[in-house]
Amino acid sequence: MSQENVEFMRRANALLNAGDWDALAELYHPDVELRDLQHAPDVPEVLQGADAMSLVVANWTEVYDDFGAEVYDYIDAHPWVICDTRWHGKAKGSDVPIDVHVADAYEVRDGKIVRAINSYPDVATALDALGLEG
């Protein structure tokens, strides 16, 4: 099952980079919990549910051009997949690039993302925070 979760997250990343927000939304459980450890000031750290995910996506697409994520490594930590990720983009109307390297954790259950914790400083910190072996 764990390798299936890794492949599932590869597909999710491909959809994000293609800007296929509707298909990406289908991968999230309706009651998904999203925790962003480096959230925007006007967005709560914890969001719950599909509507909240839609709000986050709307914020991303309104602010950024050329928004995407390059995942350097997918770490199988069943039921979690830890993604060593470089988020990149460019704010609309600006030539200044956005480039952030973090570790994101996704709990996958029954073919859906049920929990996401974004923006750990690195993979080791994510694994430790989740009580998983590194």
Image (cartoon, rainbow, N blue to C red):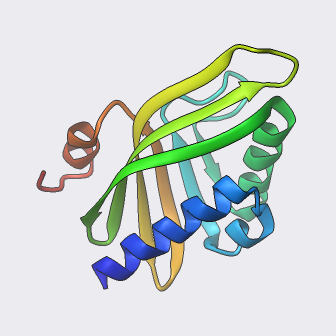
In the rendered image, residue 60, in percent from the top left (x then y), is placed at 75, 39
Residue at 73% in and 72% down: 23
Which residue is at 86% across, 36% downward? 62
Vertical placement of 28 versus 130: above or below? below
Q: Position of residue 2 (x, y in %)?
A: 29, 78
Asked if 85 appears above or below 114 in the picture, the reply is above
Q: Residue 112 at what x, y percent from top left?
A: 54, 77
In screen coordinates, is 105 left or right of 47?
left
* Vertical placement of residue 98 versus 104, above or below: above
Foreground: 133 or 73?
73
Q: Is residue 42 left or right of residue 121?
A: right
Q: Position of residue 71 (x, y in %)?
A: 44, 49
- Splitting the image into 4 quarters, where does residue 7 fall? bottom left
* Residue positioned 56% across, 57% down in the render: 33
Image quadrant in which you'd find residue 102: top left
The quadrant of the rendering that contains the N terminus is bottom left
Left or right of 85 in this view: 56 = right
Residue farthest along the left direction in this orientation: 133
Farthest residue, direction front:
95
In this figure, what is the number of numbered marks? Answer: 0
